[in-house]
């Protein structure tokens, strides 16, 4: 379930890296414009993407409960919400582009950034349509369709970047247009494929779409605030020095290809947990969570080891500066530890989202991110002079706190092993709660993974 989601996430990162590589040949002003503009678009879009990521657990629950018709009705609801959020988010992106020139000290970079972001605001509704279809299919147990669409977007993006930037001479405008066309191809491919089965637009309503928005808004706010923390950490490191900030950014790009699959493990855990919950199979649910822990920890152990062993070669792909390489080498060690901590953290978040415990996940994730990381980064990186390594130490402490709190929550709800505490599960998880007394009497149901639809 997880590997196609991981490929989709890695494909998105590859598209960003390709755009950066092409635009980097245009000069520092163009690179700065695309970097800031792309971050702004990503931040605005992330709210809607996170809403669908949270709401897809209801799709999984419907399929798990053997109610495919109800799940199909939700597809039309997702599409209506994508249209609504797409228009609003696109307008917000365009308005944000008007203020971006004030961010840049270089007036040329500011003007290019505003133009780049304004063009890419057209992409936002397309991205949310793609997300709504992809997340719905993931909830139905199909994670490969969204992966194929993401790969198609990359296939379209690379040659269009080359043609628009260098052949047509459109520069930053060409890079923005290439991304818009790539997103359009992704959305068109997903819509064409789903249309054969039906979009179920008429079975839905905008009133239901607003209900889905209320369900997923907590996760949407969590995602935006999580992204904002990285901006704060970068600002704190900028006060330490450009070498430490450069080491942080390069190490982040290197480690990202190891961290994204862990997010995929959390997403897969969320979908499969919701399906098991809908099927009334708490023993299967706990088996899936154990499998998620083992798989993600094995992956993070191997990836962390490779990260440390190959760190110097990976860092040299981005820079040859000796000071940056030295600082980056120290950061990668902490990145490997953070990788190992993020494995259970993402699985636990997926587990609790699968039983629709969104508010607790949001409070823990955002609370730890803002209460722990910024002040600890200031203390370790700035006051003690540990630089970028201090920032990554702070993130390790943040995730360790998050793992502890989410583990206590999952244990309290009886989601990790069979116990009488399962009866304390919230009313939104009737399947787990109702089966707890039976298991407590020593007569657990005979269930298997094959029983899931």
Image: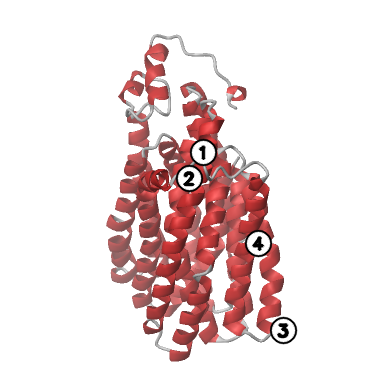
Instruction: For the N terminus, give its image quadrant.
Output: top right
| Lower position in the chain sequence, tag 1 or tag 4 | 1
Task: Determine whether the residue tagged by mark 1 lies in a helix, strand or loop.
Answer: helix
Nearer the observer: mark 4 or 3; the answer is 4
Residue 121, percent from left and from top: 49, 70
The answer to whether residue 451 is above or below residue 308 is above
425 with respect to 322 (left or right): left
| Lower position in the chain sequence, tag 3 or tag 2 | 2
Nearer the observer: mark 3 or 1; the answer is 1
Residue 255, percent from left and from top: 54, 60
| Lower position in the chain sequence, tag 3 or tag 1 | 1
C-alpha separation, residue under disc 4 versus residue under disc 3? 21 Å
Q: Which residue is mark 3?
A: 167
Task: Determine whether the residue tagged by mark 3 lies in a helix, strand or loop.
Answer: helix
Q: Colour mode? A: secondary structure
Query: Which residue is at the front of the view, 266 or 219?
Result: 219
Q: Which residue is mark 4?
A: 185
- Report if residue 337 is visible in the image: no
| Lower position in the chain sequence, tag 4 or tag 3 | 3
Q: Which residue is mark 2?
A: 77
Q: Mark 1–mark 2 contact, CB under 8 Å? A: yes
C-alpha separation, residue under disc 1 versus residue under disc 4? 25 Å
């Amino acid at each position: 379930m997880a590997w196609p989601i991981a490929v989709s996430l890695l494909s998105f990162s590859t598209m960003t890296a390709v755009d950066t590589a092409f635009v980097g040949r245009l000069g520092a002003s163009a690179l700065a414009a695309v970097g800031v503009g792309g971050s702004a678009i990503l931040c605005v879009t992330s709210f809607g993407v996170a809403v669908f990521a949270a709401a897809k657990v209801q799709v999984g629950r419907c399929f798990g409960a053997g109610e495919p018709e109800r799940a199909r009705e939700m597809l039309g609801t997702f599409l209506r919400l994508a249209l609504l959020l797409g228009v609003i988010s696109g307008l917000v992106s365009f308005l944000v582009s008007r203020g971006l020139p004030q961010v840049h000290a270089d007036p040329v970079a500011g003007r290019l950034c505003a133009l780049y972001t304004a063009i890419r605001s057209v992409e936002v509704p397309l991205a949310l349509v793609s997300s709504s279809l992809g997340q719905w299919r993931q909830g139905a147990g199909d994670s490969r369709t969204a992966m194929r669409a993401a790969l198609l977007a990359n296939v379209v993006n690379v040659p269009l970047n080359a043609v628009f930037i260098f052949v047509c001479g459109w520069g930053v405008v060409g890079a923005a247009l290439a991304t818009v066309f790539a997103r359009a191809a992704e959305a068109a491919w997903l819509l064409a494929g789903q249309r054969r089965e039906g979009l179920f637009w008429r079975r839905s309503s905008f009133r239901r779409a607003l209900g889905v928005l209320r369900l997923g808004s907590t996760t949407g706010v969590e995602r935006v605030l999580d992204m904002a923390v990285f901006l704060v950490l970068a600002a704190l490191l900028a006060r330490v020095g450009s070498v430490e900030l450069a080491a942080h950014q390069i190490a982040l790009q290197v480690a990202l290809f190891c961290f994204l699959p862990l997010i995929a493990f959390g997403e897969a855990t969320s979908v499969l947990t919701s399906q098991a919950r809908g099927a009334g199979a708490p023993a299967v649910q706990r088996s899936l969570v154990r499998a998620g822990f083992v798989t993600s920890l094995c992956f993070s152990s191997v990836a962390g080891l490779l990260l440390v062993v190959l760190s110097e070669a990976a860092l040299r792909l981005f820079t040859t500066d000796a000071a940056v390489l030295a600082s980056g080498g120290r950061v990668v060690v902490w990145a490997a530890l953070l990788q190992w901590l993020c494995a259970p953290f993402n699985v636990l978040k997926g587990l609790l989202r699968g039983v629709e415990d969104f508010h607790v996940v949001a409070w823990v994730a955002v609370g730890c991110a803002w209460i722990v990381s910024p002040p600890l980064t200031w203390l370790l990186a700035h006051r003690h002079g540990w630089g970028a390594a201090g920032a990554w130490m702070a993130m390790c402490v943040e995730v360790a706190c998050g793992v502890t709190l989410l583990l206590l929550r999952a244990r309290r709800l009886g989601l990790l092993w069979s116990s009488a505490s399962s009866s304390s599960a919230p009313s939104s998880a009737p399947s787990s709660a109702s089966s707890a007394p039976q298991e407590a009497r020593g007569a657990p149901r005979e269930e298997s993974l094959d029983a899931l639809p």
